[in-house]
Amino acid sequence: MGCDIHMFVEVKYSFGDNNKWINFDHHTKNPYFDEYRDTPEFDVIELHDVRNYLAFEQLCGVRAYTESPSISPPRGVPIDISAFVKQHIESWNIDGHSHSFVTLEEIRIYRANLKDLSFDGLKYIHEALELRAIEYFLTPEGVDPKNIRIVFFFDN
């Protein structure tokens, strides 16, 4: 049985003295909305939806087959998660596992320290997150890599 990742992008939004993580995913209109019960109006367009076990291993040790180090073991759902992402995670109930999150800063550091780039499973996730960061922060120079993250979990 295969294992898939579900990723959500969050950015830290600051207003006054308050900081709050908000969802920053792209969405598409669900054509089945209003036709079937409990169908959401919009579907999340995945940041990167390819099944890549090396990336899973490097993110948090899930499906570890190569002994490649991971950024961290699964950290669980962040306590300051956005309401939108929390709702999606809860909808998976026990079918979701190994919940975690990593910032763009952590991905940059991990990839910068890779000795063998042929074992770079995070390349495409990293590139997609960099592009999403520029969308939010407007310029590459304006990106704060500590304030954008992916929240993810797996199913199988």
Image (cartoon, grey):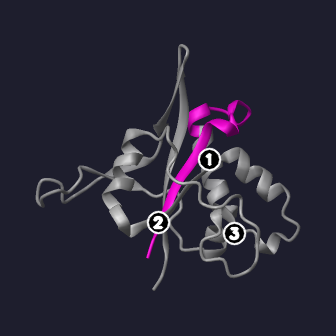
* CA neighbours of label 3 inside 10 A, class few (<14), some (14 to 19), many (20+): some
* CA neighbours of label 1 inside 10 A, class few (<14), some (14 to 19), many (20+): some
Residue labelled with disc 1: 131
Foreground of the two, 66 or 44: 66
Residue labelled with disc 3: 121
Residue labelled with disc 2: 97
Q: Is residue 143 magenta?
A: yes
Identity of the residue drawn at 72% across and 49% down: 106
Residue 20 image point, x, y percent: 50, 29
Between discs 3 and 2, the one toward the N terminus? 2
Q: Is residue 38 above or below residue 118?
A: above
Q: CA distance from mark 2 to mark 1?
A: 27 Å
The C terminus sits in image quarter: bottom left
Q: Is residue 19 above or below residue 49?
A: above
Identity of the residue drawn at 61% across and 32% down: 137
Q: Amino acid at mark 3?
A: Gly
Q: CA distance from mark 3 to mark 2?
A: 20 Å
Between discs 2 and 1, the one toward the N terminus? 2
